[in-house]
Amino acid sequence: MEKVFRSVALIQKIEEEKSLFLVKANAERNQLEFVIGERLEKESFREAITREVSWQLDLERKRDFIVSNMAQLSMEYTGTLPGAVTESQIAVAFYLVHLYGNSARSKFIESTTTQWITAAEICQGYTSSGGEIDPIAVYWINRWGILQAWQ
């Protein structure tokens, strides 16, 4: 049985009393995706997501962002992921990530490879402009109520 051990970064900012979450474009899959890290052997879920946020977004670990000490939610189950045919042993952990410092925040203001989206867009699986959001992450978020559309 395949094992899927992933950490998901919920990179959040508050704007006009609403939470927005950073996603990045995956042109190959034609969808928007959260920063997701596959946990390596002897690595914690938190270490995996810290590594991936730094690498995928080209940010300095100690200067540009902070990952919450505890996962917002950590789940383990056996099941079939959307788009898959066989069951997998799945472990997933969601971490809030906050950008700090002007250099980190300004990096994503005019980015063409990332965008800020609302919880409502995440829960419905696509943005107001029609962009699809990674169906596996959306499945997990809706399955466990990690985000609510009104947030």
Image (tube, rainbow, N blue to C red):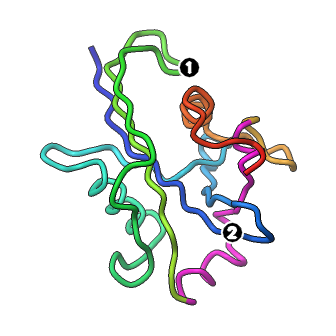
What residue type is disc 2 on?
Answer: Ile
Left or right of residue 150: residue 58 = left
Looking at this view, name the residue that lies furthest to the right: 129
Around disc 1, counting alpha carbons within 10 Å, would you say few (fewer than 14), some (14 to 19), or many (20 or more)?
A: few
Q: Position of residue 16 (x, y in %)?
A: 80, 71
* Magenta extent: 102-123
Q: Position of residue 145 (x, y in %)?
A: 60, 34
Q: Position of residue 75 (x, y in %)?
A: 38, 31
Task: Report if the CB atoms under discs 2 and 1 are less than 8 Å apart.
Answer: no
Q: Residue at x 57, y 89 (%)?
A: 102
Q: Position of residue 35 (x, y in %)?
A: 49, 54
From the image, tell me which residue sits under label 2.
Answer: 14
The numbered mark, 2 or 1, whose residue comes first in the sequence reads 2
Q: Residue at x 69, y 41 (%)?
A: 148
Q: CA distance from mark 2 to mark 1?
A: 33 Å
Looking at this view, name the residue that lies furthest to the top: 86
Looking at this view, name the residue that lies furthest to the left: 42
| 89 to 150, vertically: above or below | above
What residue type is disc 1 on?
Answer: Gly
Element type where label 1 sits in the image:
loop
| 112 to 109, vertically: above or below | above
Numbered circle sitting on residue 127: none
From the image, tell me which residue sits under label 1.
Answer: 83
Mark nearest the camera among 2 and 1 is 2
Left or right of residue 120: residue 133 = left
Quadrant location, the N terminus = top left
